[in-house]
Amino acid sequence: MPASSMRRIAMPADGIETLFGSFDENLRQLESVLNVTLRTSGHDLMVDGASADVGRAERVIEQLAALLREGYRFQRGDVKMAAELIADDPQADLREYFLRGPARTAGRRQVVPKSVTQRRYLEAIDRHDVVFGVGPAGTGKTYLAMAQAVAYLVSKRVTRIILARPAVEAGEKLGFLPGDLQEKVNPYLRPLYDALYDMLDADRVDRLLERGVIEVAPIAFMRGRTLNDAFVILDEAQNTTSEQMKMFLTRLGFGSKAVVTGDITQIDLPPGRTSGLVEALQVVKGIDGIGVVFFDERDVVRHALVQQIVKAYEAYKPAP
C-alpha cells in the first residue's frame, strides 16, 4: 500500500477566492485530477493522500500560489488545466504556460486555450500549414481555428479568410427551399457566421464579407480554385466525401494555412459513403508538416453537463 502523507501549503490572501473557485469548485477539480484530498485552514491548504500524489499536488499548488503573488487572476478552467499540465508533465512550468502561453487577440476578444489539448491545437496551427482538429462537439475546434484566422488577418499574415462547410443536403435535395443557392446553403454556414460576429464588430464583418476578404461558402465553391495568402477553415469535415476532401486539400496555395475540423462520431453522409475526414486521416498520417490533434470529452468547454453527455454516449452500447 503506498505511503500516505499530509502537507500544509501557505497561500496568499489576495485573489485566493478566484483560485479556490465558487464553493471551492476548483479544489474539487484538483482533487479529482491529482487524486488527493484538499481542505482549507484559513488561507492555507491541507493536502492529504499518497506521498507521490501529495508531492505532485504540492508542485501544482505552490506554482499557482506564486502566480497569485505575481498578480495573475485565474479564469474559469485555469486551475483544472494547471492540474492536467502537471499530471501530463510533472516538470511543467505553469508560469511559462499562463504568463507566456498562446493567447490570441482575435479582433475584440482575447482567446485563451482552456485545456492542454486546446493549447496543443493552437501551437500546431502556428507550426503547420495543414492541421486536422478532430473531436466531439463543444471542444473549441472551430472557435479556436476562427480565432487564429482572425488573428492572422488582423496582423496581415494572410490577406483573406475562407470558411467552408459541406452542405450534406445540398444540390437537388434543397431544390424545394426558397431563395437562390446562397440562401439555400446559408443555414449550414450559420455557425461560422456566429463565431465571426463574436470576434469582430458586426459592421466590420459585413464590410469584410462585402469586399471578399472573408468568404463563407459551401465546400463545392472551392472547386477549381487555388487559395493563396489565405487562412482556410473546413468545418464539419466528417460530412465531406472522399472526392470533396481531396479537392479541398489540393486547393492550398502559397502563404496559406488550412485547418480541417470535424467529429467522426457525427457523420451524416448517406449509408455506404466514406467520410472524407476519416479517409484523409489515414492518407496523410505519414506526411511531415501536417498536424493532427485529437480532442476528447475533457476538452469540452460548454456547459459542464455536455462533458458528461459526450462521455455517456462514448460508453453507451445499444442492446443487440
Image (cartoon, helix red, strand yellow):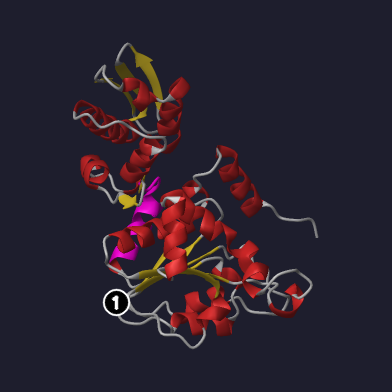
Which residue was labeled with disc 1? 255
Does the magenta portion include 225? no
Above or below, 149 against 217 in this view is above
Query: Which secondary structure type mostly characterizes the magenta part of the structure?
Result: helix
Residue at 30 percent of width and 59 percent of height: 154
In-front residue for pair 316/105: 105
Q: Position of residue 66 (x, y in %)?
A: 21, 30
Q: Position of residue 150 (x, y in %)?
A: 37, 59
Is residue 141 visible in the rendered image? The answer is: no
Q: Position of residue 185 (x, y in %)?
A: 64, 69
In-front residue for pair 297/118: 118
Residue 173 vs residue 229: left or right?
A: right
Residue at 75 percent of width and 56 percent of height: 318
Is residue 138 visible in the rendered image? The answer is: yes
Q: Mark 1 falls on what kind of element?
A: loop
Q: Residue furthest left?
A: 70
Does the magenta portion include 113? yes
Residue 169 vs residue 90: left or right?
A: right
Q: Quadrant of residue 40?
A: top left
Specify start and end residues of the magenta stretch as a single range.
111-126
Say which quadrant the N terminus sits in.
top left
In-front residue for pair 8/85: 85
Q: Residue furthest top?
A: 42
Residue 157 vs residue 243: left or right?
A: left
Residue at 48 percent of width and 47 percent of height: 298
Above or below, 205 against 171 in this view is above
